[in-house]
Amino acid sequence: MSAHTSDPIHDMFVQYKTIAVVGLSAKLDRPSYRVAKFLKEQGYRIIPVTPTYDEVLGEKAYPSLLDIPKNQPVEIVDIFRRTEYVPEIVDQAIEIGAKVVWMQLGIIHENAAAKARSHGLQVVMDKCTKPEFTNRFLSPQV
């Protein structure tokens, strides 16, 4: 019997390996940079989504989710943008066929979440990917 059978976040980390980080900064002190760097170190493919930079963490950056080439399917959309930007990002996530919309700590948008779910996407709100991963895969098991 698996201890994780009823943990959808655990399953997301196991099943999906490509993460578009919307709002990724190239500044080392920014949470988006630290989290994306950590996820890349864990073996995930990071696709930076930011109009500010051409490249972040050695990966080509795209101005929006819609600019990512179709031959690079995005599974998880990790959002580091303010709440008012979430509906547009969710619309783009739906359009590109993403599987998960992940709103970082402090980001909650119930209407956008409902729309994402109605299109078959899984939704995580108000949680940071780094500690959620760490707690499930890197913490000592009791």
Image: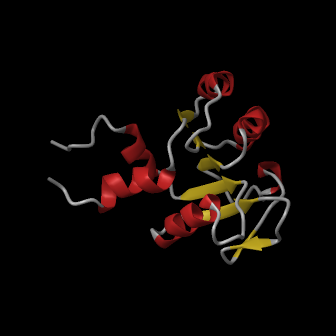
Coordinates of residue 68 in the picture (x, y in percent): 77, 57
Query: Residue 133, located in which quarter of the rendered image?
Result: bottom left
Query: Residue 29, located in which quarter of the rendered image?
Result: bottom right
Q: Which residue sits at x=82%, y=68%?
A: 53
Looking at the image, residue 27 sits to the left or right of residue 52; the answer is left
Disc tally is: 0
Most extreme residue toward the bottom is 58
Query: Residue 82, located in which quarter of the rendered image?
Result: top right
Coordinates of residue 102 in the picture (x, y in percent): 57, 42
Coordinates of residue 35 in the picture (x, y in percent): 55, 61
Looking at the image, residue 18 sits to the left or right of residue 111; the answer is left
Residue 52, relative to residue 112: is it above or below? below
Residue 80, relative to residue 36: is it above or below? above
Looking at the image, residue 126 sits to the left or right of residue 73; the answer is left
Q: Which residue sits at x=14%, y=53%?
A: 142
Q: Which residue sits at x=49%, y=72%?
A: 41
Q: Which residue sits at x=30%, y=34%?
A: 6
Coordinates of residue 134 in the picture (x, y in percent): 37, 58
Residue 118, relative to residue 92: is it above or below? above
Screen quadrant of the N terminus:
top left
Residue 58, relative to residue 140: is it above or below? below
The colour scheme used to paint the residues is: secondary structure
